[in-house]
Image: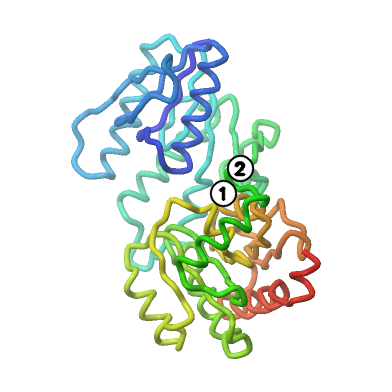
Amino acid sequence: MHVALVHMRHAAIGGTERYLNHLARHLAALGDRVTVVCRTHGEPPHPDVRFEVLKGLALGGSWRMWAFAQAVEKHVRAADYDVVYGLGKTWTHDVIRLGGGCHRTYLDLVADTSEGVRLKDRLALKIEDRALAKGAYRQVVTNSEMVKRDVVTRHGVAPEAVRVIHNGVDLARFDPARRAERRAQLRGELDLGPDARVVLFLGTGYTRKGLDLVLDAFSELAPERPELRLVVVGRDSTPGSWEALAEGLGLADRVRFLGERRDAEACFAAADVYALPTRYDPFANSTLEALASGVPTVTTETNGAAELIEHRVQGSVLSAELPDESRARALANELRHWLDPEVARAG
């Protein structure tokens, strides 16, 4: 078959980008003709993968997104693809994968819309409505049952037209057999002794991922557990404000902000518990990475990956119905459970 994989950005990093590369490589290895339709691209994931670059004139990121969707519609109409697989914000496809979930749900749960909805979000909603309109697709792929329920409810998609395919994890990279070695290495780098108990927070966009809830929970636990440390890994647009928040809670000497790192496997190995009280994640890959590393994970019902966790077996799942203050207290209770020496030994 001649397959078009459509996403505005092709690159080596990023969740959707990695998925795109894996899929393109696999299809090319099977002998299919694979064309990545994009605006920008990096190195091809397989020698037989080709690129179709659609790079029309557009001012600003919002209109660039809309112009790309229009260009894809025009290009696909004239091309000879057997299957068009949409991975981003476009409306021309046979199959659409909602790796980012429903944009309106993201706005409802995360975004500050007190001053109105931004242009970029308004355009994203228009694209999503067209992409999921009746007759616009043959199949919808979601990465969690949570997103499937959402797309059926919000867009009237028939349940039988939605296929749930959970994200995967690199079991060679996130290998508990190498945990002791990696644990000692990173803990040595951070000057954390063998008796330190480490809660890890890892993510991009600290508000959406719930770092404020982690800091509140940690401030409750810290007086009880002098050996407890919080390690924060990832990227945020206002890192200084988070460091100031930790200092204001009296946690400056108990919290380490490491910034963005490329060795997530070492970060999980160094941790005793992974805390991700995210406000919305269609399927947080880091959940699987933590579990594959042998680290209990505390997350929320608004993380699609939570449906793979049995409560207090592999980790804990916090109710989505709780307000922030109650959710922080519930998070503290679950961290307290997983940090209990008897529970840790049993694990």
Disc 1 is placed on an element classified as helix
Say above or below: 204 vs 67.
below
- What residue would you read off at disc 1? 285
As measured in the structure, the alpha-carbon distance from the residue carrying label 1 to the one carrying label 2 is: 8 Å
The quadrant holding residue 224 is bottom right
Mark 2 is on which residue type? Answer: Val
Rendered location of residue 275, percent (x, y): 59, 66
The foreground one among 289 and 310 is 289
N-terminal-most mark, 1 or 2 = 2
Mark 1 is on which residue type? Answer: Asn
The foreground one among 133 and 283 is 283
Please report contact status of discs 1 and 2: CB closer than 8 Å, yes or no.
yes
Q: How is the image coloured?
A: rainbow
Disc 2 is placed on an element classified as loop
Rendered location of residue 295, percent (x, y): 66, 60
- What residue would you read off at disc 2? 169
Say above or below: 322 vs 152.
below
Rendered location of residue 111, percent (x, y): 42, 61
Q: Is residue 154 left or right of residue 76?
A: right
Residue positioned 35% across, 27% down in the render: 43
Q: Residues within 10 Å of mark 1 (few under 14, many from 20)?
A: some
